[in-house]
Amino acid sequence: MALEVDRAEGSYIYDYRGKGYLDFISGISVSIVGHRHPVVHRAVTEQLDRYWHTMVYGEHVQHPQVRLATLLHEFLGPSFDQVYFANSGAEAIEGAMKLVKKVSGRTRLVSFRNAYHGGTQGALSILGSEMYRSPYRPLLPETYLLDYNDEGCLDFLDERVAGVFVEAVQAEAGALPADPGWLKALEARCRQFGIALVFDEIQTGLGRCGTWFGFQHDGIVPDVVVMAKGLGGGLPIGAFAASSSMMQHLAEDPPLGHLTTFGGNPVCAAAAVAVVEVIRDQGLAARAMMAHEIIAGRVKEWSLESGFPIHLSGRGLLLGLELEIDPMKAREWISRCWQAGLLVDWFLFNEGRLRLAPPLNISEGELHDAIDILRKAHG
Ligand SMILES: Cc1ncc(COP(=O)(O)O)c(C=O)c1O
């Protein structure tokens, strides 16, 4: 893309020539309340004026972390009374992998084909694509991939499995939602064999899919929830949340069983508090659903008028748009959108499908502008 970024504001990124690009990627679901939201900006500058880093490993009580954990607990549900802060999605996934092994004393980890969980060695070991994993073998042993939305595969889950890592909407597969019946069956199987059910909410969480977290759409209660990306609204922070009885296993035998120097950095945590408060105060989860309806309506109209089928996948504002099965043609279409001032891209494991993941507070006018550009650029 080679976009030389000069500045970013709201739903727009500007290059050095002053050209504005409507951002329908959001840095891959990161700029969830838009770029440089004034409330987040104020929270960050106020924290910069207080302290940036003091001491880690829980030695110092830092109010931005406490406030953030309290807010997340409120929106995750009563069983999530402890939160561990990390610096990124992959790092939070690593922590969750360690946690479920330590709690159960079991070694097997299960995840699903076409799921992306991060680029570190552990996260890569449960990533659902052999193409991305094979150059880095040997990876972690005893990691197993099953087919998403396939109930038959669930027989594999038994008392040898420590944890199952799943997304409510498989983001990089092309915004593919889980079948509610399948998720319920997965949850029941995990309960039956005492397997920790871990939801990777790194893309789906914080209102993007119309509920605070994707698992809430289907009434599932996971054991561990992992988040990052949108949490800091553009500042790097990740987290995994669980019950304190589970988390206690990381605090003993050995003590300090999981460490990070910068995790929950107070400036990033202050930004995250502001992001969560903006999502709450402006009802952005509900707005994501309203925006979804507008996009779905425009896509339906487009399909009727053009006479060819257009597939819109996903939930809320984590959407995939498919007109071209051929990835090369999709790439050309994406390039024409960039030239016309709309940033869209493809999915890692579904290159023929366009990602639509704008900030949740995008205006109605901007939504219509984006669809107009998509239509014109497709021709
Ligand atoms: C679903 C999901 N999980 C985990 C990750 C890893 O997050 P990070 O890139 O912050 O390490 C990503 C990143 O794209 C993701 O989409």
Image (cartoon, rainbow, N blue to C red):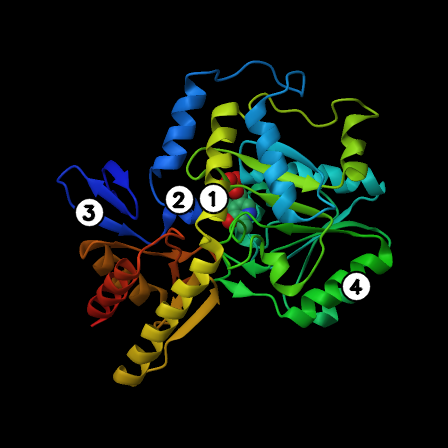
Position of 268 compared to 364: left or right? Answer: right
Disc 1 crowd, CA 10 A, few/some/many (<14, 14-19, 20+): many
User: In the rendering, at what x and y percent does residue 139 appear?
Assistant: 65, 41
Q: Earlier in the sequence, mark 4 or mark 2?
A: 2
Give residue 338's position: percent from left, percent from top.
23, 54
What secondary structure is marked by label 1? helix
Q: Is residue 350 visible?
A: no
User: Which residue position holds label 1?
Assistant: 230
Counting residues from the start of the chain, the first of labels 1 and 3 encountered is 3
Q: Amino acid at mark 1?
A: Gly
Q: How far, Cα to Cα, is label 1 from label 2?
A: 6 Å
Which amino acid, by three-letter code, is at mark 4?
Answer: Ala
What's the distance in space between the residues labelled 1 and 4, CA to CA?
30 Å
Q: Which residue is mark 3?
A: 20
For label 4, being within 8 Å of ligand 1 is answered no
Circle number at residue 188 = 4
User: With respect to residue 269, does 192 lie above or below?
Assistant: below
Report which residue position mark 2 lands on: 31
What residue do we see at 21% from left, 42% from top? Answer: 14
Contact between marks 1 and 2 (CB within 8 A): the answer is yes
Q: Amino acid at mark 2?
A: Ser
Q: Earlier in the sequence, mark 3 or mark 2?
A: 3
Front residue of 217/281: it is: 281
- Mark 1 or 4, nearer chain start: 4
Spatial CA distance of label 1 from label 3 is 22 Å
User: Measured along the vertical axis of the image, is residue 312 above or below residue 240?
Assistant: below
Distance of label 4 from label 2 (alpha carbons): 35 Å
